[in-house]
Image (cartoon, helix red, strand yellow):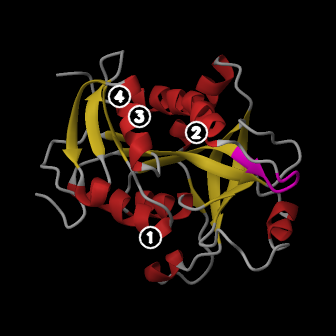
Amino acid sequence: MPTPHNSANPGDFANVVLMPGDPLRAKLIADTYLHDVKLVTSVRNIYGYTGYTKNGKKISVMASGMGMPSIGIYSYELYSRYDVDVIIRVGTCGAYQENINLFDIIVGSVASTDSNWIHQYGLNGHYSAGADFDLVEAAVNSARKKNVPVHVGNVLSSDIFYNADKEGWKKWADMNVLAVEMEAFSLYCNAAKLKKKALCLLTVSDSFLIREELTPEQRQNGLLRMIEIGIEAGEKFAKESE
């Protein structure tokens, strides 16, 4: 039955969900890459759609909003209330390493964080939140087939976008963290806790080393190949059309 944040009915979502942050990007993905599309939820204008890929695989796409609390709510409900098995975040990030260029793809195999998200589990130590290996492998293989520059490794999921410590990012970079984003850690924790699969795919939209940023038009076009990689990876786990 519906939740406080999701008006979909049981069975409305596919077992694989692509999750961009922006609700309008969710609509773009559904309109561009899926057919026989149905809008299944629109609570708070967080749009969720279900349709079929060109290969006949049933896939859903739903926005996550911004930040770990937001994706934490939506991913938890998808996993626990709607029988979703796989969530693939498709978003943007800021690069921390000089060998990473704008438009490159980052596969977040591990997520570090400055958040207190992990506190809820009462662990006596430091938890390393990671992606599902099969999803990582599928995404990397897809990117390489397309000759898309891809980097695999640790990303920082931060609570802070406008950080008062202007140089703090350098300490993360010194630990070979590839880039910063704001959602992967809580998604990976939810997947681990609920015994599900998750992956974070990122397009590099800016760099902390050169302070170069994409225009809105470049950002939109640059995301398309990441979305295609995400769909191809997700299709390996999606059910056939009924």
Residues at badges 4 and 1 in contact (C-beta under 8 Å)? no
Query: Disc 4 designates what residue?
Result: 31
Cα gap from disc 3 to disc 4, whole angstroms: 5 Å
Task: Please tell me whether mark 3 sits on a helix, a strand or a loop.
Answer: helix
Magenta residues span: 205-211
Q: Earlier in the sequence, mark 1 or mark 2?
A: 1
Query: Disc 2 designates what residue?
Result: 136
Q: Nearer the viewer, mark 2 or mark 4?
A: 4
- Residue at image coords 81%, 48%: 212
Cα gap from disc 3 to disc 1, whole angstroms: 24 Å
Tell me where residue 128 appears, x and y as whole percent. 61, 65
Cα gap from disc 2 to disc 3, whole angstroms: 24 Å
Q: Earlier in the sequence, mark 2 or mark 3?
A: 3
Q: Is residue 37 above or below residue 100?
A: above
Q: Is residue 228 above or below residue 9?
A: above
Q: Which mark is residue 28?
A: 3
Cα gap from disc 4 to disc 1, whole angstroms: 27 Å
- Residue at image coords 34%, 59%: 74
Q: Is residue 242 above or below residue 107?
A: above
Q: Amino acid at mark 3?
A: Leu
Query: Disc 1 designates what residue?
Result: 69
Tell me where residue 129 appears, x and y as whole percent. 57, 62
Task: Please tell me whether mark 1 sits on a helix, a strand or a loop.
Answer: helix
Drawn side of residue 237 relative to residue 37, left or right: right
